[in-house]
Amino acid sequence: MISRVAAWTALAGGTVALFWGLLSVFGTPTPRCGGWRMQPGDVCGGRGYEEQLAYETTRMQVEAGIALGGGLLLVIAGLLLLARATRALSEDAGPDTGRRKLLAQQQGWRYRAVDPDVAARYPNVGLSRNAADNDYSRVLSGDLDGTAFDVFNHSYTFGVGVGAIRHEETVFLLRLPPCAASFSVEDAGQVMPPELRPMVLTEPLRRACTRARVRDWAVVDSTLIYAEPVIPDSRVKRIPARLADLRTVAAAIPSIVFSGPRID
């Protein structure tokens, strides 16, 4: 999500800069003295009309060069970010090579190729995203330092007919002790609802998120929820590493979240 916002921001900024640069290239310099428009024969601060005209022409050329160069770089960066974000959204998990099942055997976890009961085990965390054709596959379930978890590929469809788009992502769910509140952390700095920010986003938790490179996550119904572009079997070793990262984040959640009065 952040990548797409950054991409569109860069594209918009680059377009504005290019437009400004073109205006400077094709614009007509106007010699001015303060707020007054100079006429041939006028003198301003010891500088005549022709000198002021040459100065304004040079200034516009420099501004045009900066605007066009910067605008072009922003547009290119925006296109690259947008392409990357689009690939991430549309990436396919690929064929089941058995590597995730092997990982489960090595770690002492459980593996199910398909598990339609995932949503039933987490009825209140909003897994369906109000989308259609929700599928939960290559499900890993286990325990990490006393924290029960499920990791799976979640594919779902937004829209209908020719406008339907199929998405797939890898979801991590970690069971936490009973929590006093549900909240989300966006970009490792914004908390929703915002009134919970002082209670939730302590400096230790912020440092844990930064160290673990976990930016967007949530706690709902005493479950830590995190999703990222689908992890194909070729990168299956990322799963235990990411679980460890999320366990670090969970350990840094302030104790008041678990011991305080219920906040609805």
Image (spheres, rainbow, N blue to C red):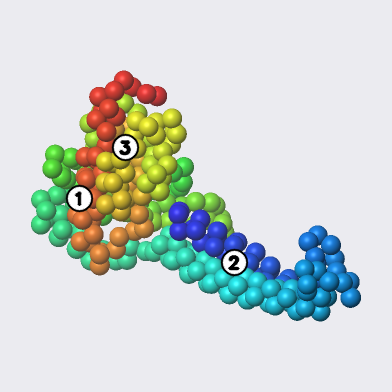
Label 1's element? helix
Q: Are marks 2 and 3 in contact (CB under 8 Å)?
A: no
Dot 1 or dot 3: first in sequence order is 3
Residue that numbered label 3 is attached to: 202
Between label 1 and label 3, give the one nearer the viewer.
Answer: 3
Q: CA distance from mark 2 to mark 3?
A: 36 Å
The amino acid on which the numbered mark 2 sits, given as a three-letter code, is: Gly
Image height check: is 152 above or below 81? above
The amino acid on which the numbered mark 1 sits, given as a three-letter code, is: Ala
> Furthest-front residue in view?
46
Dot 2 or dot 3: first in sequence order is 2
Dot 2 or dot 1: first in sequence order is 2
Task: Point out residue 258 in the picture as x, y percentages from the top left corner.
Answer: 26, 28
> Counting other residues with Cα less than 10 Å from the Cα at mark 3, is it few (<14), some (14-19), or many (20 or more)?
some
- Residue sitting at x 20%, y 61%: 237
Q: CA distance from mark 1 to mark 3?
A: 20 Å
Residue that numbered label 1 is attached to: 244
- Residue sitting at x 73%, y 76%: 55
Residue that numbered label 2 is attached to: 14
Image height check: is 18 above or below 260? below
- Residue sitting at x 24%, y 53%: 242
Task: Point out residue 77 in the picture as x, y percentages from the top left corner.
Answer: 50, 69
The amino acid on which the numbered mark 3 sits, given as a three-letter code, is: Thr
Q: Is residue 34 visible?
A: yes
Instruction: Depth check: give the residue in front, 212 or 105.
Output: 212
Image height check: is 113 above or below 44? above
> Counting other residues with Cα less than 10 Å from the Cα at mark 1, is it few (<14), some (14-19), or many (20 or more)?
some
Label 2's element? helix
Task: Point out residue 248 in the picture as x, y percentages from the top left corner.
Answer: 22, 45
